[in-house]
Every structure is written in structure tokens, then in C-alpha cells.
Amino acid sequence: MDILKLLETNSKLTPSQLAVMCDMSVEAVNSKIKEYEEKGIILGYKTIIDWDKTEREYVSAMIELKVAPQKDLGFDRIAERICLHPEVQSVSLMSGGYDLLVVIEGKTMREVSNFVFNRLATMDGVVSTATHFMLRKYKDKGVIYNSDEEDKRGNIL
């Protein structure tokens, strides 16, 4: 199996475990991982946390942006400016009815709304925005979220 696929599924796998799973030597695995990191193929290692099971209060939103691309730069320059904001979790160029999909996090809906109103909508090149608040995550990055809570209808979630 491919080292990258295995690490994407579980970044805690050790080089020894990866070597067995990929039928490679530990040295070869270490060398490949180092090469992937140097080439920017592996960009980082993340832990997926179910924040709903913690005391942390936050709100996530997806914002659709229609933008006017800049001459010779297309959508890249405005996407780069959006990426600089710490609230922004991801920015993606999309096909279809809007150009960029921006995922952000804030402490409250008001904080997210203020960010959209004061920071995103006022940027040069932004034509329109549509904000969608995320109510619950069921699956993220291939991981299914489980909940033992009962919903109001008496069903186990």
C-alpha cells in the first residue's frame, strides 16, 4: 500500500509499521517521508477532534464568494489575501455558481457574520457572498463522528 494513503488515514503510524505495511525497509520509508516533506507533498500532520464533545464553543461557516478575477492573476491573488486571515480554515476554487468556497470558524454567529460583512464582502474583487452555517458534522476527512446523545425525537444519534 502507498505510504501517503496510509499516513493520510493515520498520521500516527510509525516508520516501522509503515515499512511492514508497504513491504519496504524502515530506512526507505524514512527517506520517502523526508522526500515528501521536502517537496511539499506532505504539508503537515493533523489530529481530527470532535469539538462538540469538549467545552470549546465555536461556529463554522461555509461562505460562497463570487469574485472578479484579476488580470494575469485570475483568482489566485484574492484567494491568497483571504488565506491570511486566522479565522479562515480553507479556501478552494470551485466550478459552478460561485468562484471560491471559504470555510471559517468563530466564537459566535455574530463574530462570523461580522467577519463576512467587514472583511470578506469589502475586499476588492468580491462581487457577492452567501454564508451557510454548519450545524453538525457527521463525517470529516473520512472520519465518521459518533454521538451518544439523544435527540429531541428520542432517537439515538
Image: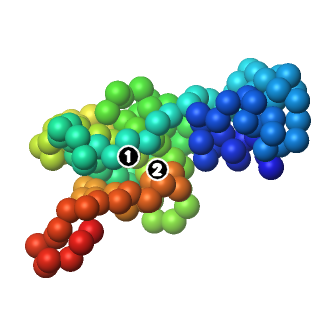
The residue shown at (75%, 30%) is: 16
Choose mark 2 or mark 1, whichever is in front. Answer: 1
- Under mark 1, the amino acid is Val
The mark found on residue 119 in the picture is: none
Please tell me whether residue 146 is drawn above or below residue 117 in the rendered image. below
On the image, numbered disc 1 is attached to which residue?
103
Please tell me whether residue 44 is drawn above or below residue 131 in the rendered image. above
Q: Tag 2, which secondary structure?
A: strand
How far is disc 2 from disc 1 in space, using C-alphas? Answer: 10 Å
* Observer-nearest of 62 and 28: 28
- Under mark 2, the amino acid is Leu
* Count of picture labels: 2
Cβ atoms at labels 2 and 1 below 8 Å apart: no
* Observer-nearest of 39 and 140: 140
On the image, numbered disc 2 is attached to which residue?
100
Quarter of the view holding residue 38? top right
Residue 68 in percent (x, y) is at: 46, 47
Residue 116 in view: no
Q: Tag 1, which secondary structure?
A: strand
Placement of the C terminus among the 4 image quadrants: bottom left
The residue shown at (80%, 49%) is: 1
The residue shown at (51%, 65%) is: 96
Residue 54 in view: yes
Please tell me whether residue 37 is drawn above or below residue 52 in the rendered image. above
